[in-house]
């Protein structure tokens, strides 16, 4: 019997990001990493969100990050943070005007001029249905060619949680099937085998390590990021030993990211809850309830977080080495640990 439920609105009046009443301000040691700790996958949406954002990053030992930030906010953030931040080029979300391709291309050029060397294609089932395009669309192919001509890393969100395929995407005539979505992606991976391609959220299918293993073995240009807090907590924890073996086996092909999203009502505690969960999940042997409410499960079946307690040498790679190496091959440089420490003090 599936535990999936329709999203609820009648949860108890406790913060969804702190069901356990944790004090996220308690001291926590930095990750055991030589060099800067990089959060590869974030969404800093506005310059005005910087104080809480940087406060949470500093507290949890995160030195630098890549972000999908609206172009209109990017210049001020870059001015303030320098090489502590790098942008992943994105379109203007929700742009359904006839010139959406040209607008995306203009934004791509602007992001490139700001130092961006990564472009993101959000191809979740709901997004493809709403926007009426996928990776095969002629307009998307034009944008991919432009990014390749500029020697940029390709990145995509393909797939979504299995629970979503069971409920919100159950109408396959409207949303398609997971198998078809991955066929389309694989065709692009094959077409661009000489180009680094990063699959967000463990390739969009942490529920299926066998699929991920097959993809990584078949496409040496493919890397996966470990982002999305509730999704990773739920699905990685459910198959803790299998996923630990997977991460260790593919330790050179994984980049850590939180999928942190800023917001006007997202204070330090909200942002801290995501970083707390990630550090518990990857670094420790913690076994206990997640402090973050999972709206995809009912109250009687909330996730148990089961930490992978990854070896230090694996943490070194997913927090630092892989991101710095892969992005460095495309000209992206992060501040040194000393530069970050100096900026934190000031």
Image: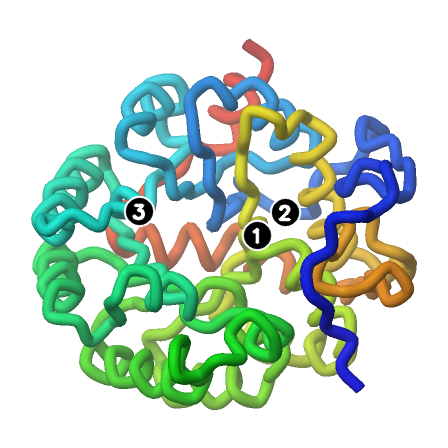
Left/right of residue 186 with respect to residue 274 in the rendered view = left
Name the residue at 44% across, 54% down. 323
Which of discs 3 and 1 lies nearer the camera? The answer is 3
Which residue is more in the foreground, 332 or 216?
Answer: 216
Please name the residue that numbered disc 2 is placed on.
33
The colouring scheme, among rainbow, by chain, secondary structure or one colour, is rainbow
Give the SS element for disc 1: helix
| Residue 268 percent location from the top left of the image | 68, 26
| Residue 36 percent location from the top left of the image | 53, 40
CA gap, disc 2 and disc 3: 39 Å
Please name the residue that numbered disc 3 is placed on.
94
Label 3: how many Cα within 10 Å (few below 14, some 14–19, many 20+): few
Residue 233 lies, with reference to residue 236, above or below; the image says above
Q: Quadrant of residue 17?
A: top right
Label 1: how many Cα within 10 Å (few below 14, some 14–19, many 20+): many
Left/right of residue 208 with respect to residue 26 in the rendered view = left
CA gap, disc 3 and disc 1: 32 Å
Left/right of residue 93 with respect to residue 166 in the rendered view = left
Residue 211 lies, with reference to residue 65, above or below; the image says below
Please name the residue that numbered disc 1 is placed on.
319
Whether residues under marks 1 and 2 lie with C-beta atoms below 8 angstroms apart, the answer is yes
Which residue is more in the foreground, 216 or 100?
Answer: 100
Quadrant of the snapshot with the N terminus: bottom right
| Residue 2 percent location from the top left of the image | 76, 81
Q: Is residue 322 visible?
A: yes
Name the residue at 39% across, 56% down. 325
Label 2: how many Cα within 10 Å (few below 14, some 14–19, many 20+): some
- The answer to which of marks 3 and 1 sits earlier in the sequence is 3
Q: Quadrant of residue 154?
A: bottom left
């Amino acid at each position: 019997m599936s535990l999936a439920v329709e999203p609820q609105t009648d949860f108890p009046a406790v913060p969804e990001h702190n069901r356990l009443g944790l004090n996220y301000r308690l001291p926590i040691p930095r990750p055991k990493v030589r060099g800067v700790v990089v959060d590869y996958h974030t969404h800093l949406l506005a310059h005005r969100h910087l104080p809480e954002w940087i406060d949470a990053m500093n507290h949890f030992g995160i030195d630098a990050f890549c972000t999908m930030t609206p172009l209109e906010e990017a210049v001020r953030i870059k001015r303030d943070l320098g090489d502590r931040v790098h942008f992943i080029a994105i379109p203007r979300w929700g742009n359904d005007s006839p010139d959406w391709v040209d607008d995306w291309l203009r934004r791509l050029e602007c992001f490139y001029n700001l130092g961006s060397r990564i472009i993101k294609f959000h191809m979740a089932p709901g997004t493809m249905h709403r926007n009426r395009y996928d990776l095969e669309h002629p307009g998307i192919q034009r944008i991919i060619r432009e990014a390749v001509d500029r020697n940029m890393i390709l990145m995509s969100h393909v797939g979504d949680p299995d629970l979503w395929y069971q409920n919100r995407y159950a109408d396959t005539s409207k949303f398609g099937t997971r198998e078809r979505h991955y066929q389309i992606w694989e065709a692009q991976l094959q077409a661009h085998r000489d180009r680094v391609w990063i699959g967000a959220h463990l390739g969009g299918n942490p529920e299926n390590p066998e699929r991920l293993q097959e993809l990584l073995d078949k496409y040496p240009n493919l890397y996966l990021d470990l982002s999305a807090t509730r999704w990773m907590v739920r699905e990685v924890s459910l198959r803790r030993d299998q996923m630990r073996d997977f991460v260790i086996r593919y330790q050179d092909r994984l980049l850590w990211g939180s999928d942190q999203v800023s917001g006007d009502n997202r204070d330090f505690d909200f942002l801290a809850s995501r970083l707390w969960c990630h550090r518990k999940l990857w670094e420790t042997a913690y076994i206990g309830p997640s402090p973050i409410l999972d709206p995809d499960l009912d109250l009687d079946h909330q996730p148990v977080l089961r930490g992978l307690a990854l070896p230090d040498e694996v943490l070194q790679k997913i927090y630092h080495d892989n991101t710095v190496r892969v992005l460095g091959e495309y000209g992206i440089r992060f501040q040194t640990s000393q530069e970050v420490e100096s900026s934190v003090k000031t």
